[in-house]
């Protein structure tokens, strides 16, 4: 299990930017693939982005492709989500998650065993 703590959420105007961070406790952080997901109350959790353990491979949901960038710094045990050109529909609680092995189900990464507590992102018009 990995302890994950997200930060960087907040209130931003549409068209603005935010950078989320997720700090991990694991000494073997570099062995984990990391993902970002989001959830709106009353809706299912939605995949946003995933990055491989080495950081060389990334994959995005169509809804954020070209606007969001996932990255990681294994020396700092941290994964980031840079969010640009934010839209009202990006409003959600954002969660980071960790997995030793990425599995895909219907094109969506699954089997993340560790989750953070979430950070709220609110985009106003």
Image (tube, rainbow, N blue to C red):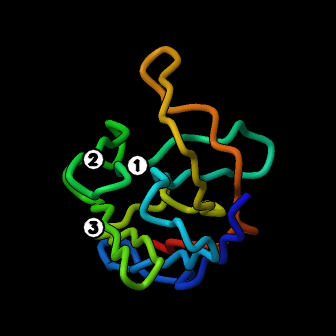
Task: Verify CB contact (< 8 Å) between mark 1 and mark 2.
Answer: yes
The circle on residue 58 is: 2
If the image is split into quadrants, where does the C terminus sit?
bottom left
- Per the image, label 1 sits on a secondary structure element best described as strand
Closer to the camera in the image, 97 or 9: 97
Q: Mark 3 vs mark 1: which is more N-terminal?
A: 1
Q: Nearer the viewer, residue 88 or 105?
A: 105
- State the residue position of label 1: 49
Mark 1: give few (<14), some (14-19) or many (20+) Cα within 10 Å: many
- Depth-wise, is mark 2 or mark 3 nearer the camera? 2
x and y percent of residue 4 in the render? 66, 71
Residue 83: image quadrant is: bottom left
State how far apart marks 3 and 1 are (Cα).
16 Å
Q: Secondary structure at mark 2?
A: strand
Q: Which residue matches tag 3?
A: 85
Extreme top residue here?
106
Sequence-wise first label, 2 or 3: 2
Q: CA–CA distance between discs 2 and 3?
A: 19 Å
Q: Tag on residue 122? A: none
Residue that appears at 58% across and 41% down: 46
x 58%, y 53%: residue = 98
> Helix or strand or loop: what does disc 3 sit on?
loop
Of discs 1 and 2, which sits in the foreground?
Answer: 2
> Quick check: 56 above or below 103?
below
Query: Between tags 3 and 1, which lies in front?
Result: 1
Question: Which residue is outermost to the right?
Answer: 42
């Amino acid at each position: 299990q990995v302890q994950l703590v997200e930060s960087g959420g907040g209130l931003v105007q549409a068209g603005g930017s935010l950078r989320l961070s997720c700090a991990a406790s694991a000494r073997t952080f570099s062995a984990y693939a990391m993902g970002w997901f989001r959830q709106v109350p009353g809706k299912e959790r939605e995949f946003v982005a995933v990055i491989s353990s080495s950081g060389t491979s990334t994959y995005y949901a169509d809804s954020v492709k070209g606007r969001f960038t996932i990255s990681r710094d294994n020396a700092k045990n941290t994964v980031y989500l840079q969010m640009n050109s934010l839209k009202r529909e990006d409003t959600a609680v954002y969660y980071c998650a960790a997995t030793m092995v990425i599995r895909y189900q219907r094109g969506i990464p699954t089997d993340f065993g560790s989750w953070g507590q979430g950070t709220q992102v609110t985009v106003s018009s």
